[in-house]
Image (cartoon, rainbow, N blue to C red):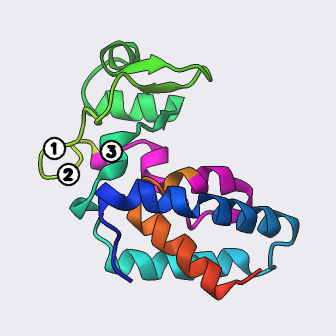
């Protein structure tokens, strides 16, 4: 499967939204016992074909949540005090979470590489969350991510083929 172009990904995701929502609603009601194994296989297969550096749409269009541990780790890496890091880069959103002051991500280089890759936030390390345990519990997040990440879009399309409900 080829990656959908970023310029049409949102439209493709929007066109599939109702179908995907119904699929995930059914999945929540009766998740197969081996779902996490299937998702891990789909995730691994997709990321053998996908190079995030070709896209970085997640870094360009959305910002991660920053945990206290993220803030402390990144601040130390940047040789800042945690409060200095917060004041310089973060804001508190409507859910009372720390997020970037703006997108695209401040730490994204022009070649789609991350300046803080080795210490990046947990949310970035785990994105697009398609290999997460109890995958069926994050369907709302996945519905959002298919519009951001071509790999997530492909994984969900393959999942529907492999696990017809």
> Between tags 3 and 2, which lies in front?
3
Residue 133 in sight: no
Q: Secondary structure at mark 2?
A: loop
* Magenta-drawn segment: 117-143
* Residue 104 % position (x, y): 28, 36
Q: Are marks 1 and 2 in contact (CB under 8 Å)?
A: yes
Mark 2 surroundings: few (<14), some (14-19) or many (≥20) residues within 10 A? some
Q: Secondary structure at mark 3?
A: helix
Mark 1 surroundings: few (<14), some (14-19) or many (≥20) residues within 10 A? few
Q: Main secondary structure of the magenta part?
A: helix
**On residue 59, which mark appears?**
3
Vertical relation: 159 (above or below) 97:
below
Vertical relation: 135 (above or below) 98:
below
Q: Quadrant of residue 96?
A: top right
**On residue 113, which mark appears?**
2
* Residue 143 % position (x, y): 59, 55
């Amino acid at each position: 499967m080829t990656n959908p172009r970023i310029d049409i990904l949102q439209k493709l995701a929007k066109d599939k939204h109702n179908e995907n929502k119904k699929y995930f609603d059914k999945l929540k009601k009766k998740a197969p016992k081996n779902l996490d194994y299937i998702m891990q296989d789909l995730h691994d297969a997709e990321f053998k074909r996908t190079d995030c550096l070709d896209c970085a749409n997640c870094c360009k269009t959305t910002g991660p949540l920053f945990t206290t541990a993220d803030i402390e780790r990144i601040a130390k890496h940047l040789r800042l005090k945690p409060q200095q890091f917060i004041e310089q880069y973060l804001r508190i959103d409507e859910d009372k979470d720390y997020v970037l002051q703006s997108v695209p991500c401040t730490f994204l280089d022009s070649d789609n590489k991350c300046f803080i890759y080795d210490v990046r936030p947990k949310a970035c390390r785990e994105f697009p969350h398609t290999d997460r345990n109890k995958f069926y519990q994050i369907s709302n997040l996945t519905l959002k991510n298919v519009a951001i990440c071509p790999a997530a879009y492909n994984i969900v399309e393959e999942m529907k083929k492999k696990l017809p409900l």
